[in-house]
């Protein structure tokens, strides 16, 4: 079975009612893949979803979710790198720099919410502006720090699905984790365990097909040395019932 056929098969299995739904505009979303490169084989952090959740029960996933409308207003310890912003601004439809910031900040927020691992930097006297989902940062005297993020891929859920996302997949080195919130992952949470697994290991074989495509891109990038912002960024999307892979352009 081809890669595109496998993706289509798994998408259909997860959204059985998809075929008769009208067009839904994809919602912006962000995913963060944390990488530990201290050993001979890089490891990535995955979380196992609760067996009773509706979507992908018991599956290993990377932390991620929808962008909040206030993400672009969150104060940060450092601006997103210009090269990262340039990559986020590529493609269609055209977006503003504020939306590019929202995507990067959402990846950090979702990772902290779902795993308790926070990418931030201590900045005195400014964290009082953080509340809600950002309270763990404020409690630790941190502001979110997107300066170590890299864009790995973009993917849009096929038309006809009830839930459609325009997802940007980011990665960051595990050394960027500066704070851990205890008790976020437990038997009754959305994620019941966190595991650092080597690329190519069994838990990763059970990932969603599109996520495996993105992980393959990350593996190829890591095999060439340090991550760079000037590497090509693939864009996975669907038309005519088939998956297409392009490279994000200006």
Image (cartoon, rainbow, N blue to C red):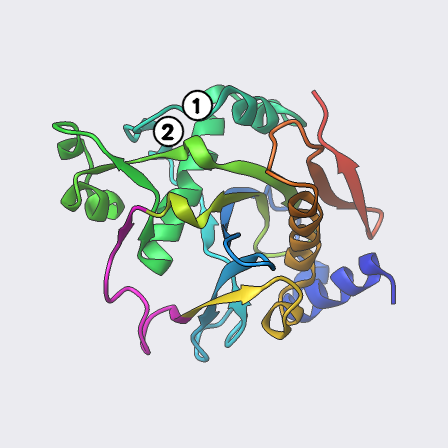
Q: Quadrant of the C terminus?
A: top right
- Mark 2 Cα-neighbour bin, 10 Å: few <14, some 14–19, many ≥20: some
Helix, strand or loop at label 1? It is helix
Q: Nearer the viewer, residue 8 or 240?
A: 8
Is 129 displayed left or right of 98 in the figure?
A: left
Residue 130: horizontal and vertical position, in percent? 20, 37
Residue 111: horizontal and vertical position, in percent? 39, 51
Q: Is residue 157 in view from this perspective? A: no
> Residue 189 appears in which quarter of the rendering?
bottom left
The residues colored magenta run: 178-193
- Taking the magenta stretch, the answer to whether it contains residue 191 is yes
- Mark 1 Cα-neighbour bin, 10 Å: few <14, some 14–19, many ≥20: few
- Taking the magenta stretch, the answer to whether it contains residue 127 is no
- Judging by the rendered image, the residue that carries numbered circle 2 is 72
- Judging by the rendered image, the residue that carries numbered circle 1 is 98
Residue 46: horizontal and vertical position, in percent? 49, 63
Q: Quadrant of the N terminus?
A: bottom right
Residue shown at 48%/20% (left/top)?
97
Is 228 displayed left or right of 224 in the figure?
A: left
């Amino acid at each position: 079975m081809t890669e595109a056929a496998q993706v289509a098969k798994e998408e259909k299995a997860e959204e059985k009612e998809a075929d008769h739904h009208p067009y839904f505009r994809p919602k912006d979303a962000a995913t963060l893949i944390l990488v530990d490169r201290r050993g001979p084989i890089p490891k990535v952090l995955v979380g196992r979803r609760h067996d009773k959740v509706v979507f992908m029960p018991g599956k290993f996933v990377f932390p991620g979710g929808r962008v909040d409308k206030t993400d672009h207003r969150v104060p940060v310890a450092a601006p997103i790198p210009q090269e990262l912003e340039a990559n986020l601004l590529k493609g269609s439809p055209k977006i503003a720099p504020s939306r590019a910031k929202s995507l990067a900040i959402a990846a950090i927020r979702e990772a902290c919410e779902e795993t308790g691992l926070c990418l931030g930097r201590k900045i005195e006297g400014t964290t009082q502006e953080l509340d809600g989902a950002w309270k763990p940062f404020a409690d630790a005297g941190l502001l979110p720090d997107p300066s170590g993020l890299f864009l790995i891929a973009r993917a849009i859920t096929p038309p006809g699905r009830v839930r459609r996302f325009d997802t940007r997949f980011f990665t960051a080195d595990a050394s960027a984790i500066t704070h851990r919130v205890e008790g976020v992952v437990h038997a009754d949470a959305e994620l019941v365990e966190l595991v650092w697994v080597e690329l190519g290991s069994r838990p990763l074989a059970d990932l969603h097909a599109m996520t495996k495509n993105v992980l393959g891109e990350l593996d190829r990038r890591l095999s060439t040395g340090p991550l760079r912002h000037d590497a090509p960024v693939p864009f996975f999307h669907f038309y005519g019932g088939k998956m297409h892979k392009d490279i994000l352009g200006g």
